[in-house]
Image: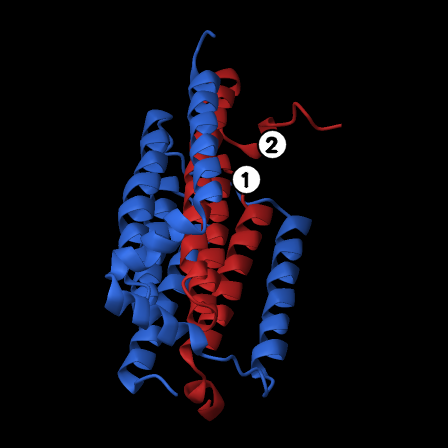
Chain colours: A red, B blue
Amino acid sequence: MQMIGGMDLTTMSLALSAILFSIGVVGVIVRRNAIILFLCIELMLNAVNLAFVAFSRTAGVDGQIFVFFVMTVAAAEAAVGLALVIAIFRHVESVDMKNFNLLRW
Amino acid sequence: MTDFPLTQLLWWVFASMAVGGGLGMVTRRNPVASLLFLVLTFFSLAAIYVLLGAHFIAAIQIIVYAGAIMVLFLFVIMLLNLGHDYQSDLRGGVWIVVGFVAAGTVGWFIWQSFGAPGAVLQRGGEQQIAASVEQMNAVGAIAYPLFRDYIVPFELVGILLLVAIIGAVLLAKRRV
């Protein structure tokens, strides 16, 4: 505990980033609701953002600029993904992933 | 150079709020409750960005992420009328085991890599950011490198957004 209390914020934030990312991974594996799957992907992207911001304390402002790009890609992914969910919902009246088997072999 | 004790204390508060929000998001059955837990996580992450010295990133985290993207999700949940859909959607059996094995692997990885001594990071970037914030302000410190060194990725991201908008409209349209 003494060692953890003495750690600096960068290292602790990297650990928090890994924890949040693993929560997102577990959510994607365990849940079947497509919208919650997207929320878990957003959580993983945020964990990566936290790692970028933490590393910007050692490597300069470039890490914070990459957070911008990650946020933009996240917005694009959310727009296209939610459009896909709406299109599939129109066919099967459900957002459960067990109905999304059109491309499954 | 160590951080102030109060900063450390606030970090622990917001980190536990972030992890609690993440766990709440994965475990809630109601999609709206799940989304609001994720918003809690985003606000806690914004606070952690402030503690790490990234003030402008914290602001756009709240405005863009917690504001815009999450409202888009909420809008779709309400459009599809999923707010009262309380059926359990956990994958049964082996998937829960797979999920927790994944979490355990990551936890073991964190324990191994961060418990070990000698993982000392150099702290050069902090002074560099502080100097450029002093010279320009918090926005300019990010805007100048963004529009000077990263102009090509910036333009490419603009094209990506255009393609994503067209794709989203095309996919969600009833009749193309």
Q: Report the residue marked by disc 1.
A: A32
- State the residue lying farthest toward the bottom: A2
Query: Judging from the image, what secondary structure is the residue with disc 2 in?
Result: helix
Where's residue A47, x and y in %? 47, 58
Say what amino acid the circle numbered 2 marks.
Lys
* Label 1 packing within 10 angstroms: few (<14), some (14-19), many (20+): some
Seen in the picture, residue B142 relative to A104 is either above or below; the reply is below
Where's residue B95, x and y in %? 65, 49
Q: Are marks 1 and 2 in contact (CB under 8 Å)?
A: yes
Same chain, labels 1 and 2:
yes
Q: Is residue B152 left or right of residue B42?
A: right
Residue occupying the point 43% across, 81% down: A8
Which residue is at the front of the view, B156 or B171?
A: B156
Which residue is at the front of the view, B62 or A86?
A: B62
Which picture quadrant has residue B174?
Answer: top left
- Residue B71 in view in this figure: yes
Query: Judging from the image, what secondary structure is the residue with disc 1 in?
Result: loop
Q: Earlier in the sequence, mark 1 or mark 2?
A: 1
Which residue is at the front of the view, B1 or A18?
A: B1
Say what amino acid the circle numbered 1 marks.
Arg
- Residue B23 in view in this figure: no
Q: Which mark is residue A98?
A: 2
* Label 2 packing within 10 angstroms: few (<14), some (14-19), many (20+): few
Q: Is residue A91 left or right of residue B96?
A: left
Please, which chain is the residue tagged with disc 1 on?
A
Quarter of the image for the C terminus of chain A: give it. top right
